[in-house]
Amino acid sequence: MPAEVREAAQILSHKEEVLAQTDEEVALRLARADEEVERRVSESEIAQAAEARAEQVAAQAQNEADRVLEDAREQVQHKIAEGEKLAGEQMEEADRYALEMRRKLEQQLNAFLSSVQAGVDALEQRPDRAEPPRQEESALPPGYGAE
């Protein structure tokens, strides 16, 4: 075989090796690129999932805070209503007590006035006592005034 043919055969053989090596290198780079794309997509999906979960947790926390706040408002309204009811009952009881005390005082004063009047009447009806000339009538018995 002539040298040129051998040289051409070697070049072709070398060309085949270079092409095979290039194909391997391209396949390896494509595989790495696919892995990188998958990794980034996966990271992106993880980030999206994490963001969605964070939004879900925040919404749950807001709902719980709203529920707790509403419960607190209801409890406050209930306590206010209880306080107003109790205050009303105590005012009614105080009014009943004041009215009862006023009636007892009135009875005692009437009894005292009746006793005083009976004493005055008894003194005026004694035969040994001459009735003094009447001056302007006073609510006080004789001897109890500015004389």
Image (cartoon, helix red, strand yellow):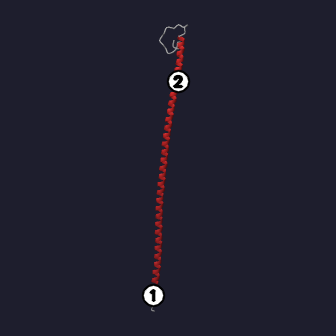
- Residue under label 2, please give it: 105
The label nearer to you, 2 versus 1, is 2
Residue at image point 52% right, 20% down: 110
User: Which sits in the foreground, 123 or 71?
Assistant: 123
Q: Secondary structure at mark 1?
A: helix
Residue at image point 46% right, 71% down: 34
The answer to whether residue 143 is seen in the rendering is no
Q: Determine which of the numbered discs, if any, sits on residue 146 in the image.
A: none
Locate residue 15, reporting x and y percent.
Answer: 45, 83
The answer to whether residue 72 is seen in the rendering is yes
Locate residue 120, reporting x and y percent.
Answer: 53, 13
> What's the residue type where badge 1 is placed?
Ala
Residue at image point 52% right, 18% down: 114
Locate residue 17, reporting x and y percent.
Answer: 47, 82
- The mark tally for this picture is 2
- Residue under label 1, please give it: 9
> What's the residue type where badge 2 is placed?
Leu
Residue at image point 46% right, 59% down: 52
Q: Secondary structure at mark 2?
A: helix
Q: Residues within 10 Å of mark 2 (few under 14, many from 20)?
A: few
